[in-house]
Image (cartoon, grey):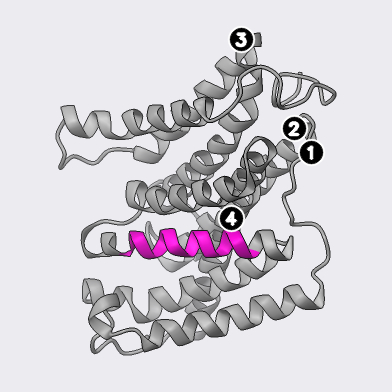
Amino acid sequence: MSVAGISRTEGAGRGLRGLGPLVAILAGAALALLGPRLFGDPQSSDPDAWRLAAYFGTLWLVALAVPRLRPVAPLAFAFTTLALPYSVWTFLLGWSAGLPGVLGGPDSLGRMASAGVAEWLVVLLMAGLYAWRCPAPAPALRLVRLPSLAVVLAGGLGSVVFLAIAFLLPAPVIGREGVPLLAFAPPNVFAYIVANASTAFAQELQFRGVLQAELERSHPWVLAVAVQGVVFGIAHLAVSYAGPAASFVPIVIALGLVWGLLTRWTDSLWPAIVIHIVADVFITVAILGGLYGL
């Protein structure tokens, strides 16, 4: 049985069609995420990512088991690819059990780097499984093709444009008032780069890779780009951003849309990966410190 629960010769257009399955999956995710907050203690610590991973994973297994729902299984698996690796990242980052001292304690840079690499490996494994066993039409993950000169230029120029816009924006808009650049010791620089690069790479493969590719299989590409961009921003709001950083969500949605269009235009994930890594490093160093007083 394939990831989709149907053979590669069965078209993705058979069975359930249109926006119905997508809307139903997202509505269920909203209930799974918001339900405990609406009917429980909104101040309590709640494993949002694990709950979403359980919801998407259960939906995928049910779709595999019910023949009528099998065409929905690839989409459910694509959403599982978003939630499960992030859940692994949060677990490893905050795990308090004994680990080699080189990784440091919970939330340390060393732990962030190791958790980021683990998240990237889980995403890579799930993306490979999705690409290997997804029914026809085959998805376009846009990862393995060697970058062309245009792709390299798009990544480089896009990074320059991103930094230029970020530094030209009024400081209050992005919380950059009086934020000095952080000084890192050499060992911390390496851990910092690994932590940001691995998570940025993982997110691009999740959203612009698996999710956008799956949506493009059965929906117009404009809708696919729009949905993945909005889900990208909402996902940050749901499990990552809080307090003053919540104001970044519209910006994150805009970035998701731009990176989705760039991926579609270049037919490659690499420009978005490069720009995303640059963005994560810049935001952490020059913006988040101002928002939280770090």
Disc sitting over residue 138 in the figure? 1
- 203 vs 47, left or right, is right
Which residue is pictured at 82% across the width and 26% down the height?
8
Q: Are marks 1 and 2 in contact (CB under 8 Å)?
A: yes
Determine the CA span between mark 4 and mark 3: 31 Å
Residue 102, position as x, y percentages in the image: 51, 65
What amino acid is at disc 2?
A: Cys
Question: Which circle's residue, 3 or 2, is located before the other in the chain?
Answer: 3
- Residue at image mark 2: 134
Residue 5, position as x, y percentages in the image: 71, 19
Q: Which dot, 4 or 2, sits closer to the camera? A: 2
Asked if residue 250 lies in the magenta stretch, the reply is yes
What amino acid is at disc 4?
A: Ala
Give, as a single range, the part of the protein colored magenta.
248-262
Examine the rendered structure and indicate whether residue 246 appears above or below residue 176: above
Determine the CA span between mark 1 and mark 3: 22 Å
Q: Nearer the viewer, residue 115 or 282?
A: 282
What amino acid is at disc 1?
A: Ala
Which residue is pictured at 41% across the width and 48% down the height?
235
Secondary structure state at the residue bearing disc 1: loop
Residue 49, position as x, y percentages in the image: 40, 40
What amino acid is at disc 3?
A: Val
- Dot 1 alpha-carbon crowd within 10 angstroms: few under 14, some 14 to 19, many 20 or more: some
Secondary structure state at the residue bearing disc 2: loop
- Dot 4 alpha-carbon crowd within 10 angstroms: few under 14, some 14 to 19, many 20 or more: many
Examine the rendered structure and indicate whether residue 3 appears above or below residue 281: above
- Residue at image mark 4: 202
Question: Which circle's residue, 4 or 1, is located before the other in the chain?
Answer: 1
Q: Is residue 98 at all visible to an observer of this figure?
A: no
- Residue at image mark 3: 66
Q: Which dot, 1 or 3, sits closer to the camera? A: 1
Which residue is pictured at 61% across the width and 66% down the height?
272
